[in-house]
Amino acid sequence: MAVTDHVDFPTFMEGVKKRNPHQPEFVQAVQEVAEDIFDFIEDKEDYHSEQILRRIAEPDRVVSFRVCWEDDAGNIRVQRGWRVQNNNAIGPYKGGIRFHPSVNESVLKFLAFEQTFKNALTGLPMGGGKGGSNFNPKGKSVREIMRFCQSFMTELYRHIGADVDVPAGDIGVGGREIGFMFGQYKRITGEFTGVLTGKGLEWGGSLIRTEATGYGAVYFLENMLKHRGESLDGKTAVISGSGNVATHAAEKIVQLGGKVLTLSDSGGFIHDPDGLTQEKIDWVKTHKTHRRGRISEYADHFTGATFHPDATPWNVPCDLALPCATQNELLGPDARALVENGCTAVSEGANMPSDLEAVHVFKDAKIMFAPGKAANAGGVAVSGLEMSQNSERRAWKEDELQAMLHDIMDGIHDRCITYGDQGGGYVDYVKGANIAGFKKVADAMLAFGVV
């Protein structure tokens, strides 16, 4: 086999940018991984000659389609839908579906790329994919959401399957939307199969799926602290978001003796110096899920809490930070504020919530920083367990699933240490996660040849 000239990092990134114009989120995700991978593969000729990183950074396919639906007033509406199938070297494509006005091809390609490594880190046989639409479910009636989901699945069904691609929920897609899509898939194909995860318990869903991402992010945080001889007990935490991931992360921190000071949504954040109790967290869950309310109303309901409009919580002094809202919500200046105010650990509950500048600030300060591909893998891990339960036509008990989730998060932490331990008590979790995830996918790709 001819020896391939080694492309350096700047040349590689120049090629990525040239091939993916106007896709900043995807380029950012590739750069964040490639920064760590290049040193690791320097002396590994097979990875160079087989162009492994170049191939992983090119999705297997990007499917784009039109979604037509009728609103309650009888108007015909047109949205765009996508499914990005990034890599299936270690298992069927696996990743959520997102409904949000910000969804575009760049965002979904970044999410599918990240998902490839996240899924590899779980140790479960799952490839990486992501899908969604620029449809905005906010302000829509239940019937409108149903009609949109049915139309979306009418196109998507031909690209997915229990052994091909298994979507799940994401922003804007919860159990209700999964139900509408699964119903349409079953209607079209006549099959009752584990083609979607995040399903209702009555029809193939798994216990603790709702809690898994938030709990998992805290379990990973707990592991980082334990590695330093510390615990969550008595520590203060700021959390962004107020949806499923944020509220369950808050819940687990409180259970482990920590004190949660903030939650947020797109309108701003609330600061509760007394700390969120389980009662307060339950109020937020009900308020956001059933009433579709805004987090600002928390300050009206609980004495001592304040609402800060059009602001993020990263300037509130704390020991721990968990960004659990969306991508690029925590910027370089925010990271510097956290470090200066004494924050010692960050665990990402969302996908790529810290921009590259923020990541570099955390790494330069050598604080404990868990990237989303490691810290928020709990959700997809339990989705993978749901796939197994569907295949076996069985359901595991909650205590069994809790133990498996904890074990999976422990395993991810161990893999990050294997490749990220820098000595002197410092672990570069970003580097560890990137290399561990890459190596598993890359070695599978080598085994398959050039396909």
Image (cartoon, rainbow, N blue to C red):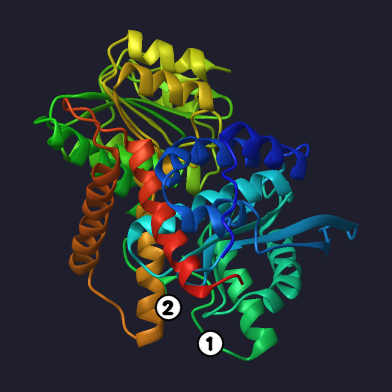
Residue depicted at x 60% and y 35%: 28
Circles 1 and 2: CB distance less than 8 Å?
Answer: yes
Q: Residue at x 56, y 40 (%)?
A: 29
In the rendered view of the protein, which quadrant contains the N terminus? bottom right
Per the image, label 2 sits on a secondary structure element best described as loop
Residue farthest to the bottom, as pictured: 190
Quadrant where the C terminus lies?
bottom right
- Residue furthest top in the image: 340
Disc 1 secondary structure class = loop
Q: Is residue 331 above or below residue 3?
A: above
Q: In this view, does 292 lie above or below 67?
A: above
Tell me the kind of residue under disc 2.
Gly
Q: Where's residue 441, x and y in %?
A: 45, 61
> Relative to residue 153, is residue 299 drawn left or right?
left
- Please state the horizontal and vertical placement of residue 419, each as a whole percent of the image: 29, 44
Give the residue at x 13% y 30%. 228
Residue 234 seen anywhere in this rendered image of the structure: yes
Amino acid type, callout 1: Phe
| Residue linked to disc 1 | 192
Residue 141 percent across, percent down from the top left: 70, 55
Left or right of residue 15: residue 202: left
Name the foreground residue: 219 vs 138. Answer: 219
Residue 368 on image: x %, y %: 28, 28
Q: Is residue 300 visible?
A: no
The residues tagged by marks 1 and 2 sit, at their Cα atoms, a distance apart of 9 Å
Residue 204, disc: 2
Answer left or right for 98 relative to 213.
right
**Which is more toward the observer, 86 or 19?**
19
Q: In which quarter of the image is residue 75?
A: bottom right
Using a 10 Å C-alpha cutoff, classify the residue at mark 2 as few (fewer than 14 neighbours), some (14 to 19) or many (20 or more): many
| Mark positioned earlier in the residue sequence (1 or 2) | 1
